[in-house]
Amino acid sequence: MSVAEDLRGARFTTAELEGHLDVLAERVFQTRTKWPHFSLLLRNLRELAAGLPPGARVVSMERGLLYGGCSLVAPLFQDHDFVSLDCSPQSADTRGAYNAAMVEDPRFLFVPSTHRGAIDQTGLETGAADLLIVPNLVHHVADQDALFAEFARITAPGGKVYVFEPLLRELHQIPDDYLRWTPFGMARAMTGVGLVPGEPETTGGPFEAIAYCWAQALEYFPDDRREEMSRWFYDRHMPELMAWDAAHTENRARQHTAFPVAFSILAEKPA
C-alpha cells in the first residue's frame, strides 16, 4: 500500500507539512538544541521531494517501530508513490515505541509504515524505487553486504539512493548499533554494488562535536544535578560552541583533516 492509498485521497496543506517538519526539527531530531546536524537531513528531504516528478516511486527504509509504527518522512512525499519499510529488528519488539512521546504533538502527521521487513526480506520488487531514502539507518543494520546489495536491487535503472549517516554517535539502541561509515567508505561501498555516488555533503565541525558530547554527558549526571547542569550548558555554552563552529570551519594546523558530525550522499544507478 502506498501513502496515497493509505490516506485515501486526503492531502496535507502547506501549513500542515510545515508543522510536521517543525515537530521533526523540535522534538524528534532536536536540531535547535541537541543535534543540529539533522538539519542537513531535513533540508535534503525537502529538496528531494520538490525535485521528484509527481507519481515517482519512493521507498524509505526507517525504524518506524520506535515512533509507534509510522514513517517520519511519508507526508513530504504525498505526491509520489511512496512505500515505507520499517526495518526495526525483532530485538526492538521488547523495547517497543519508546520514542513515541516525541511525536505526540497535534502538528505531527501520523502515516503508518507500509510494512515491516528484514533487510534480506523486504518484500519489494526489483527496481521498485525511483528514489530510495535511507535516513539514519545504515549503522543499525548488522549485515552490511545484504543492505548495500538491496540498495542496488530495489533501485530502478536511472534511480537514486539517498543516505544520511552520523559520523559521531554514542552507542545507542544497544545492541543494534554496528558501525560508523565515513563518506569515503560509504561511496566505496556504493560503487561496489554498481551505484555511482555523488559528492558527499557534510555538516558540523569540531565545536558542534564537543556540544554533541556534552549533550550526551549531561544524561550521566544524577537526577538531582542534571537540571542544574543542563541550564549551565544550554544557556551559555551551547550557543558559544555553535557560534565557534560557524566561525572556525577549517583546521589551520593540519591539512587533509576535517571533523564533520554527519554526512549525506546521493548515488545513482546507471540506466
Image (cartoon, helix red, strand yellow):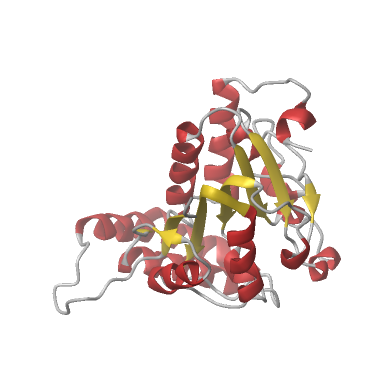
Left or right, 121 with respect to 182, comes to right
In this orientation, does residue 240 appear? yes
Res 249 → quadrant: bottom left
Above or below, 46 against 40 in this view is above
Give the residue displayed 77% in from the left and 67% down from the top: 89
Give the residue displayed 55% in from the left and 74% down from the top: 170
Left or right, 37 with respect to 3, comes to left
Above or below, 113 against 54 in this view is below
Above or below, 21 against 99 in this view is above
Residue projecting furthest to the front:
271
| Residue 21 horizontal/vertical position (percent) | 55, 37
Left or right, 127 with respect to 240, comes to right
Residue projecting furthest to the left:
252
Give the residue displayed 72% in from the left and 20% down from the top: 10
Res 113 → quadrant: top right
Q: Looking at this view, is 175 or 184 the one in front?
A: 184
| Residue 73 horizontal/vertical position (percent) | 61, 42
| Residue 17 horizontal/vertical position (percent) | 57, 29
Q: Looking at this view, is 256 or 259 the one in front?
A: 256
Q: Which quarter of the figure is the N terminus placed in?
A: top right
Left or right, 63 with respect to 228, comes to right
Question: Total label count?
Answer: 0
Q: Looking at this view, is 144 or 157 the one in front?
A: 157
Give the residue displayed 73% in from the left and 56% down from the top: 66
| Residue 267 horizontal/vertical position (percent) | 45, 56
In this orientation, does residue 224 appear? no
